[in-house]
Image (cartoon, coloured by chain):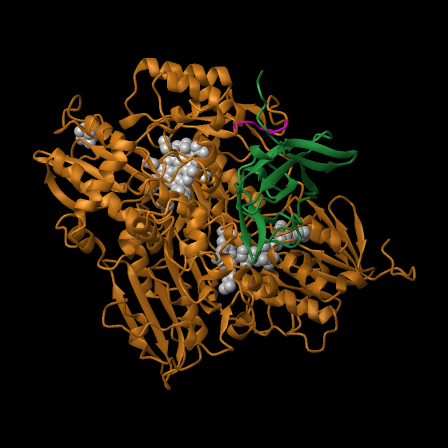
């Protein structure tokens, strides 16, 4: 008989039109970085994990270049609020609200995310 | 029809001409609320809305027309402005107050603003209309010149050696043409600089390989080439100049024809006459910008006075009683022409009674500085050529008695001129940004550059004031790396080395600024610390693999995916080709990989091959094939050693005196993978003919009959620098030892993103100090530097083969975490010249130019 090692998987879920979409296991995320997820409507979300273990999600498309790359940016914090810096032209976006820190007029969509055990 | 909330038709404001000044007028009109009380219609002749004409030439260094755009569709939308592009006004009927546009459109107006700019003046010489003759004013002109130069020209000539002529000459040279400048006056830029300044300019521009002909006029364009194309020009001194292309840049004339036809008063020498409120002889018609003849009797050919007129006219239309008036403007300019700083301000030519000059000239260095001082010791104006560092400060001091002796303002730093005049010395009402007329007081009310730009517009014109604004803004009180660390990169390097810190989080929590501890760090400090830890890895006990553990979260995306991110989200792949030497078998493998994965293939400037257009999930598959064939990472993505170029050298070349290819390969294999403050490049030439261009490299080696000469601190790029000779006639072992020490000393003491060239120019003592440290071991650290390099060499592993060996590491190479097999559908390509290129994604916010 084999004894299954005790293991709880924590899932990352994102709010989409018809409920919660499971994106991946939390263990797939590296603190300080992001991953991209494909949504049922064909959009893409960038999902991030910070050092404190919080998850965030923004639209993956960089509004300044049109490329779907925000998930590949570096995250950082300014005045205690976490942001991601686009890897292309380095504009920063608040992870909570999607607002661009360089240009108030620009924002990307922020998605609601949660982790469930 | 636009109506007010009560349903009443709004009065109509029509703007003719959507250039730089027209756009500024629209912004001012919106600020005054005119867009809410009026229907605003804009007729724009060019096929695109307003763009930054001042920076037109930057097109040739890669700025796209989109980036030059000054308008934002959102702005137009938000203020309900109707813009018609490609729709010039052809006539105006003042009796019925109607503007007729080319398409037949009629627009009635209550108020009309003319901002039609200027046209380039073409002297009436025979042949001026032949194919191959151009002017230089619009983006369409640039396209035409570029296209013609590419197909039909190897030599180009610019008629006119003024500001625009030099810009045009720079553009022609940038297009690869042998370039001539023909100027009628006895010196270049006759309007802005005096004889001394002209001489300094001539020297520097001549040194750049442009041929300057001053004091001669153009008599005829010889157009007997195929289809009557330009072949040359006849000059007034009887000589003939062979050229395939001519750009006329002999001044501009106001575009006042529309106004003449309308019966408005125009000046004798052109320009629509306006009063101090920019009103023409018809009170419901205004004229602003280069088409206007201002009330001081001048036509201004610069953008700053045009902007002031735009503000004045908007205020007048809004009936703003305290609105500005325009009675004349300062003609100060600072330009970077062909890489030479040229500035003039105030009374540059010393026309005031009893004024005296203070002049400093160094014709070897191509610098010339002149200040014009008034009777009472007040600064009236000046000219700076070659070094215009002090321009913004001096301009702001104009009209006042400077707080230090005038000679100390022109002497170069270090030449008995300790009194560097800081921005603190400026009074609060000193104008810092002359493009937007913003004073020191207004700037100091803000805390950051983005805020200043947004609230005052200062710094958004020619940009020459940005540096000074930076000095005026509150500093965080230290020269720390970023908002997270008050230490410099150098200090952090020492902390990491001495305390053997191997984790960013620990460094941040123990050594970061109080407010940043426990946070995430930022996009500046994370890669910097990642690079420091990587360059010291073996000596401090960290893992040298850049994607290990926390290190993975510190790297910029390029390091994270071990490839270079391209504009559409795809990546490029650059295998290492040491010394540029490659076997036919390896070439075939590269060809096969490129073919099988459909990659765009190009020989780089670094003697290797770049494969573009790989999707994230293709990177491991591509690299598996390459690693299999014996390739390894070329680190094109890292701040690390790039290439060591070589010439073919002694083995084949009749002049070669050493085996330059072997040395290049040895050096490339020794220093591959070394993480540094910035990228490192090298080259080895087999003799003094220098075919490998070693003197433009961070460390360059040139063979001599007795061994090798080592040059350091060379750079191409924006600010090229010739390398300096560090040591001569070295043996192989001596050469390598010196390079080991040099590179490790650089890695220890340079700032973030500081190439060796900038570092050498910055550090105290410069080259002599570096020579003392690395050749004479003045600091006694050479053993340690060598040991660090030995550790690096011993621990080198190819990052790509290490990645391929580890499923955990490979798992990040997917487009989507929840759909690992699905390629990113937004990464698309279209064919071009038998290969492919990115199909650019639609930018949701059009016109969002990143400036
Ligand atoms: C591919 C290549 C152009 C080509 O098609 O030939 C290239 C491409 C890029 N260069 Fe370069 N440079 C290339 C040779 C050069 C050279 C020529 C040389 O090395 O002999 C220079 C001038 C020499 C020098 O560096 O001093 C050069 C000076 C620059 C600079 C300006 C550096 C400076 O100190 O001013 C940058 C910008 C930077 O690094 O900040 C740059 C930056 C870049 C970047 C990394 C821009 C970016 O961030 O996307 C480009 C990425 C390439 C990619 O995605 O793969 N590239 N670049 C060349 C690659 C050579 C190689 O095999 O690795
Ligand atoms: C290469 C270059 C470099 C320069 N560098 C500098 C510099 O460093 N510093 C500086 O201060 N200035 C510089 N200038 C000058 C600066 O660009 C001009 O002063 C500025 O553009 C003037 O703005 P404007 O709106 O009056 O004219 P423009 O920008 O020329 O705009 C006028 C517009 O009106 C349009 N138009 C004309 N007639 C009609 C019509 N009937 N109907 C509809 N539209 C019409 C034209 O097509 C044009 O688009 C430079 C100019 C050039 C070409
Ligand atoms: S640098 Fe000298 S040895 Fe090398 S290819 Fe040129 S001429 Fe020959
Ligand atoms: S002086 Fe030109 S932008 Fe400020």
For the residue pair B322 and B457, the one nearer the viewer reads as: B457
The one of B453 and A30 positioned closer to us in this rendering: A30
- Can residue B149 be seen here? The reply is no
Q: Main secondary structure of the magenta part?
A: loop
Tell me where residue B655 appears, x and y as whole percent: 14, 28
Which residue: 34% across, 32% down? Answer: B606
Above or below, B224 against A92 in this view is: above
Report whether residue B262 is seen.
yes
Give the residue displayed 37% in from the left and 28% down from the top.
B633
Is B386 above or below relative to B796?
Answer: below
Chain A, chosen colour in render? green
Along the horizontal axis of the image, is B357 left or right of B380?
left
Kindly identify the residue that appears in the image at 14 percent across and 24 percent down: B654
- Place residue B117 in its image quadrant: bottom right
Q: Quadrant of ligand 2?
A: bottom right
Where is residue A53 shown, x and y percent of the image? Answer: 58, 44
Magenta extent? B813-818
- Name which quarter of the figure residue B610 lies in: top left
- Tell me, yes or no, whether the highlighted magenta stretch contains residue B397: no
Q: Position of residue B848 (x, y in %)?
A: 62, 47
Hey, which quadrant is residue B299 in on the image? bottom right
For the residue pair B596 and B290, the one nearer the viewer reads as B596
Q: Is residue A7 above or below residue B293?
A: above
Among the chains pictured, the one given orange colouring is B
């Amino acid at each position: 008989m084999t004894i299954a090692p005790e293991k709880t998987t924590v899932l990352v879920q994102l709010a989409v039109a018809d409920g919660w979409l499971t994106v991946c296991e939390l263990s797939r995320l590296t603190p300080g970085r992001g991953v991209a997820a494909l949504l049922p409507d064909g959009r893409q979300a960038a999902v991030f994990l910070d050092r404190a273990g919080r998850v965030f999600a923004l639209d993956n498309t960089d509004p300044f270049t049109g490329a779907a790359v925000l998930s590949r940016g570096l995250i950082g914090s300014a005045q205690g609020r976490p942001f991601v810096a686009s890897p292309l032209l380095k504009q920063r976006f608040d992870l909570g609200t999607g607002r661009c820190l360089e240009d108030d007029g620009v924002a990307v969509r922020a998605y609601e995310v949660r982790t469930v055990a | 029809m636009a109506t007010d909330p009560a349903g009443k038709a709004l009065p109509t404001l029509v703007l003719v001409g959507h250039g730089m000044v027209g756009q500024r007028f629209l912004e001012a009109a919106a600020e005054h609320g005119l867009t809410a009380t009026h229907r605003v219609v804009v007729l724009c002749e060019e096929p695109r809305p307003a763009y930054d004409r001042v920076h037109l030439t930057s097109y040739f260094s890669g700025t796209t027309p989109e980036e030059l755009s000054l308008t934002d569709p959102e702005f137009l939308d938000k203020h309900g402005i109707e813009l018609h592009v490609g729709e010039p006004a052809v006539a105006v009927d003042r009796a019925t107050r109607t503007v007729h546009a080319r398409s037949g459109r009629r627009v009635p107006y209550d108020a009309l603003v003319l901002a039609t700019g200027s046209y380039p003046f073409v002297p009436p010489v025979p042949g001026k209309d032949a194919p191959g003759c151009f002017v230089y004013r619009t983006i369409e002109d640039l396209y035409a010149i570029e296209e013609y130069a590419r197909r039909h020209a190897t030599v180009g000539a610019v008629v006119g050696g003024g500001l625009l002529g030099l810009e045009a000459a720079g553009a022609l040279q940038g297009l690869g043409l042998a370039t001539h400048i023909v100027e009628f006056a006895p010196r270049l830029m006759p309007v802005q600089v005096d004889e001394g300044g002209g001489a300094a300019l001539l020297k520097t521009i001549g040194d750049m390989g442009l041929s300057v002909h001053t004091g001669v006029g153009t008599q005829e364009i010889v157009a007997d080439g195929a289809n009557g194309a330009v072949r040359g020009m006849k000059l007034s001194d009887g000589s003939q100049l062979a050229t395939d292309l001519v750009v006329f840049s002999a001044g501009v004339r106001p575009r006042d024809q529309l106004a003449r036809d309308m019966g408005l008063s125009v000046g004798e020498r052109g320009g629509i006459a306006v009063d101090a409120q920019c009103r023409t002889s018809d009170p419901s018609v205004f004229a602003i910008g280069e088409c206007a003849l201002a009330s001081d009797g001048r036509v201004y050919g610069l953008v700053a006075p045009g902007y002031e007129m735009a503000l004045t006219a908007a205020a007048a239309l809004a009936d703003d009683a305290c609105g500005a008036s325009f009675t004349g403007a300062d003609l100060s300019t600072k330009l970077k022409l062909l890489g030479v700083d040229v500035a003039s301000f105030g009374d540059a030519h010393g026309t005031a009674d009893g004024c005296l000059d203070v002049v400093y000239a160094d014709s070897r260095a191509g610098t010339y500085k002149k200040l014009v001082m008034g009777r009472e010791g007040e600064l009236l104006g000046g000219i700076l050529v070659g070094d215009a560092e002090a321009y913004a400060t001096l301009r702001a001091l104009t009209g006042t008695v400077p707080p230090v002796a005038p000679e100390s303002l022109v002497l170069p730093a270090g030449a008995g001129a300790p009194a560097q005049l800081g921005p603190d010395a400026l009074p609060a009402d000193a104008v810092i940004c002359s493009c937007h007329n913003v004073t020191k007081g207004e700037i100091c009310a803000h805390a950051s550059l983005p805020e200043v730009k947004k609230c005052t517009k200062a710094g958004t014109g020619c940009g020459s004031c940005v540096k000074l604004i930076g000095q005026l803004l509150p500093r965080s009180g230290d020269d720390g790396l970023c908002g997270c660390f008050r230490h410099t990169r150098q200090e952090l390097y020492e902390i990491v080395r001495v305390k053997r810190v191997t984790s960013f989080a620990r460094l941040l929590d123990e050594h970061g600024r109080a407010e940043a501890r426990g946070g995430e760090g930022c996009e500046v400090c994370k890669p910097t610390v990642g690079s420091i830890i990587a360059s010291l890895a073996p000596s401090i006990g960290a893992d040298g693999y850049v994607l290990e553990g926390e290190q993975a979260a510190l790297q910029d995306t390029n390091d994270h995916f071990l490839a270079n991110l391209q504009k559409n989200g795809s990546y490029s792949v650059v295998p290492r080709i040491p010394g540029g030497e490659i076997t036919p078998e390896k070439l075939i493998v590269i060809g096969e990989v490129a073919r099988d994965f459909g990659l765009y293939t190009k020989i780089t400037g670094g003697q290797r091959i770049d494969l573009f257009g790989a999707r994230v999930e293709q990177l491991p598959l591509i690299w598996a094939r390459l690693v299999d064939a014996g390739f390894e990472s070329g680190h094109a993505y890292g701040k690390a050693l790039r290439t060591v170029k070589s010439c073919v050298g002694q083995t084949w070349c009749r002049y070669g005196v050493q085996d330059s290819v072997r040395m290049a390969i040895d050096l490339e294999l020794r220093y591959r993978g070394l993480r540094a403050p910035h990228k490192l490049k090298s080259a080895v030439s087999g003799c003094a003919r220098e075919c490998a261009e070693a003197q433009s490299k961070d460390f360059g080696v040139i063979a001599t009959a007795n061994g090798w000469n080592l040059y350091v601190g060379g750079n191409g790029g924006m600010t090229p620098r010739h390398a300096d000779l560090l040591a001569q006639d070295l043996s192989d072992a001596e050469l390598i030892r010196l390079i080991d020490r040099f590179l490790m000393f650089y890695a220890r003491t340079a700032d973030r993103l500081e190439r060796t060239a900038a570092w050498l120019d910055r550090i105290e003592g410069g080259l002599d100090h570096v020579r003392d440290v690395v050749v004479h071991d003045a600091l006694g650290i050479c053993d340690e530097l060598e040991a660090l390099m030995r550790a690096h060499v011993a621990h080198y592993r190819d990052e790509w083969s290490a990645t391929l060996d580890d499923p955990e590491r490979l798992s990040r190479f997917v487009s989507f975490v929840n759909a690992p097999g699905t390629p990113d559908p937004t990464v698309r390509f279209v064919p071009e010249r038998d290969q492919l290129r990115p199909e650019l994604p639609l930018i949701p916010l059009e016109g969002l130019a990143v400036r």
